[in-house]
Structure formats: C-alpha cells, structure tokens
Amino acid sequence: MNVVLLSGGGGGARFARGLASVLQPRELTAVANVGDDLEILGLHVSPDVDGLLYTLAGLLDDERGWGRADETWRALGAVGEWGGEDWFRLGDLDLGLHLVRTPALREGATLSEVTVRFVERAGITTRLLPATDDRLRTHVATPAGTFPFQEWFVGRRHEDEVVDVEYEGAEQAAPAPGVLEALASADAILFAPSNPYLSIGPILAVSAIREALERRAVRCVAVSPLVGGKAVTGPLDRMLSRMAGGTTPAHVTDRYTGLIDVLVIDRADAPAEAAVPLVVTDTVMRDREAERRLAEVVLEAACA
Ligand code: FO1
C-alpha cells in the first residue's frame, strides 16, 4: 500500500513514526514543509525535513520535540561569546548535519538530493521528500509587522497575533522530483496533525501539488491538530480563532476545502459537524503505542 503523508512540525513527525511502524518498508512517502527553512550563521536549516529525519532515525529529542537527543550546545555558546546570532539554537550534533548539507547545496545539489543521502545513511525506510527544491518561505503578518517564520516563531516566541500568512516563492515553486509521482501512485493521501496555516499550507501553496490533490482518485484523510479546540503545542488555536473565527473541526476542514474526504478528530472535539465525514478517536500521541494506534485508525479511514 503506497501512502503519501504531508507533514510539518513535531506532530507530523511523530505521526510519520506511527505510520512507519505499521506500514511495510518503503510504503510511506513523507512530503515535508520547507516554509520554515532559514539561513542562519551561513547554514541552511530545514527544521521540518530534519525533524522527520531525526524522528524516523530514532535520533530526535522527544521531550523538546525538535533537534537531536543527547545534544550539547558548546558551539552555540561560543557563537554567543563572539557576538554571533544565537537566538536560533543549533546544537553541536545538529550542526554536524548543517555542515554537510550547506556546502552540498552551495555546490549545486538540491535539497531533495541531499535528503536522499541522509535518509540512506540513517537507514530509514520511509521516503522523505521536501515539498519543493525551490525557495519557499513562510512569512507571518502581525500587528507588529511581517516576520520571516522563525523570527516570529522562535525569535518573538510566537507571541504576536497572526493576521495573515504569506508563502514567499510558492507561485514559482515546482514540486520536488518524486512528489507528483508519489501522489499519482498513492493508495491513500494523509495530512498530518500539523498546523494547517504554517505546516500544511506552504505545501498546498505549491500549485502543482494542490492541483494533484484536487484531482486525486484516492481518499485523502486529514488528522485534526486540535484537542478540545486547543492546539497540543504552538499557536494554532489563536490563529484559527483570529483568522477563521473558531476552533471546531469545521474550522479545520474549511482550511482544506476540496482537498480532503475525511477528518479524524479527537474525542474531546466530538460531537461535531463539518463539511466532510468525521472519524473520532484519541489523537494525542503520548507514546509510541498511541502513535501506532492513531496511524491504524487513520489508515483504516483512508481505506474504508
Ligand atoms: N524551536 C525553538 O523553539 N527554539 C529554537 O531555538 C529552535 C531551534 C531549532 C533548530 C533546528 C531545528 O531543526 C529546529 C529548531 N526549532 C527551534 C524548532 C523549529 O523552530 C520549529 O519547531 C519548527 O520549525 C516548526 O515546525
């Protein structure tokens, strides 16, 4: 069974781990958001690609939800001592990856090519594709001004209210090699329990990906990132309230009009009504077993 997952953020990576634990090797293709990418200290950082890589390779710091386990921060400490940018925390182990990827990109390799190399080295059996190899950057408009995603999310601790989200470069961006092929040969397409504006939105802003989803011949199932109308982590509930007028399952399905056939919601959000059928289950991925159970429910909904 070929499954394509659109994913971003920590929830997306954990859900991917659940799917990988129930599917056969190479049945899963994860398409990662790149709108969070940034260049800092001369390095290209791709947090959602790296989050999937680290999570699927068993290297993630599960408690923090990003970066590597057993991380140390000595290089960053020295960056701070020398007056460099240390607001975006790159750990010593994480830096190792960026020190390999950044020169490869500079020498002409694409993000998807470098990602394939890392997937092979990590021995991961999930296909991992960035949504695009082109430059696509999320910007967040707030009453205090418009900020590149990480400057708002990390630098300003996502405290400013969001009034709009822009995807710079999305109009010119082409899907990375393999993305359209994976969608065309998928038996099921899934949207991870990720932020619809910040994680899934940039992927859908690539018009060829959106069009492929619009003409899909298989079911597309999204998992709601809300539990009882609240975001498990991050600013989604505030964003939905402000920009969509509420935090019910219907407000989530409205972000995905014409793109999904089923929404999986948490028991805390039921009963509810929305534009597509709802499947109710426990969506909080407390541990590996919960990740696996959610994956099973979602795959069942995709194949029903
Ligand atoms: N999140 C933070 O809250 N603070 C950080 O300093 C930080 C650094 C960081 C470095 C590498 C990386 O891959 C992710 C990092 N994240 C950090 C997480 C990241 O900002 C977001 O969680 C994702 O972009 C949201 O998907």
Image (tube, rainbow, N blue to C red):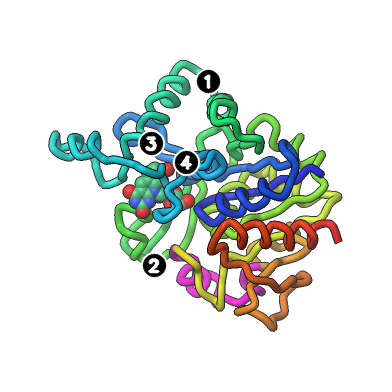
Q: Does the magenta stretch include residue 237?
A: yes
For mark 2, give the secondary structure.
Answer: loop
Label 2 crowd (10 A; few <14 / some 14-19 / many >=20): some
Q: Residue 161 carries which label?
A: 2
The answer to whether marks 3 and 2 mark residues whose Cβ atoms lie closer than 8 Å is: no
Q: Does the magenta stretch include residue 126?
A: no
The magenta segment is 234-252
Q: Which residue is drawn at 34% across and 58% down?
A: 145
The amino acid type of the residue labelled 4 equals: Leu
Percent coordinates x, y for residue 4 in the rendering: 71, 45
Which corner quadrant of the image does residue 63 belong to? Answer: bottom left
Query: Which mark is first along the chain, 1 or 3?
Result: 3
Label 1 crowd (10 A; few <14 / some 14-19 / many >=20): some
Q: Residue 94 carries which label?
A: 3
The amino acid type of the residue labelled 1 equals: Ala
Residue carrying label 4: 59
Q: Residue at x 56, y 24 (%)?
A: 117
Q: Distance between the residues labelled 3 and 2?
A: 30 Å
Q: Distance between the residues labelled 2 and 1?
A: 37 Å
Percent coordinates x, y for residue 128 in the rendering: 62, 37
For mark 1, give the secondary structure.
Answer: loop
Residue furthest to the front: 289
Query: Which mark is first along the chain, 2 or 3?
Result: 3
Percent coordinates x, y for residue 257 in the rendering: 71, 63
Disc 4 C-beta below 8 A from ligand 1: no
